[in-house]
Amino acid sequence: MLTEIDVQATLKKKLDVDFRRYAILGACNPPLAHQSLQAEIEIGLLLPCNVIVYEENGGCVVSILHPIAMMSVIDNPDLEPVAEEARTRLERVIKALNV
């Protein structure tokens, strides 16, 4: 599951300002989200995992917040295996982008 916010278009529409191409993607793996919610109902505040993609110096930058760091906001050790699995999956994506 993936959501997308086109920041450039939104800022133009709402504020009539120009901004570089910039997108916020919400990456969600339903089974991992379900596990997380079962362990900690408040984890919904941190879902989905946000990924940003923007233009810089003629290239493209992709940044992903580290899931383990993000999950550490909520003190619940039951979230650790889920965060570790999310980290592994997101690292595969980053490695594939760096080809």
Image (cartoon, rainbow, N blue to C red):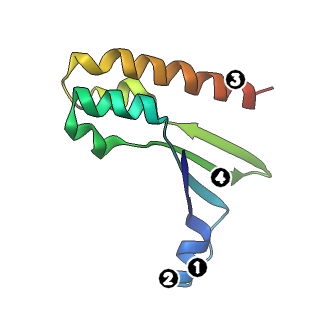
The residue located at (62%, 58%) in the rendering is 22
Between the C-alphas of marks 3 and 1, the distance is 33 Å
Residue 15's disc is 2
Tag 2: amino acid? Leu
Q: Earlier in the sequence, mark 4 or mark 1?
A: 1
Please tell me whether mark 2 sits on a helix, a strand or a loop: helix
Whether residue 51 sits left or right of residue 53 in the image: it is left
The residue located at (81%, 26%) in the rendering is 99
Tag 3: amino acid? Lys
Between the C-alphas of marks 3 and 4, the distance is 18 Å
Tag 1: amino acid? Lys
Mark 3 = which residue? 95
Residue 54's disc is 4
Between the C-alphas of marks 4 and 1, the distance is 16 Å
Please tell me whether mark 1 sits on a helix, a strand or a loop: helix
The residue located at (34%, 27%) in the rendering is 35
Q: Are marks 3 and 4 in contact (CB under 8 Å)?
A: no
Please tell me whether mark 3 sits on a helix, a strand or a loop: helix
Mark nearer the viewer, 3 or 2: 3
Tag 4: amino acid? Tyr
Camera-side residue of 16 and 25: 25
Between the C-alphas of marks 3 and 2, the distance is 36 Å
Camera-side residue of 88 and 31: 31
In the figure, residue 62 lies in which quadrant?
A: top right
> For the residue carrying disc 4, how many other residues have a C-alpha within 10 Å: few (<14), some (14-19), or many (20+)?
some
Q: Are marks 4 and 1 in contact (CB under 8 Å)?
A: no
Q: Using the image, determine if residue 64 lies above or below residue 75.
A: below
Mark 1 = which residue? 12
Please tell me whether mark 4 sits on a helix, a strand or a loop: strand
> For the residue carrying disc 1, how many other residues have a C-alpha within 10 Å: few (<14), some (14-19), or many (20+)?
few
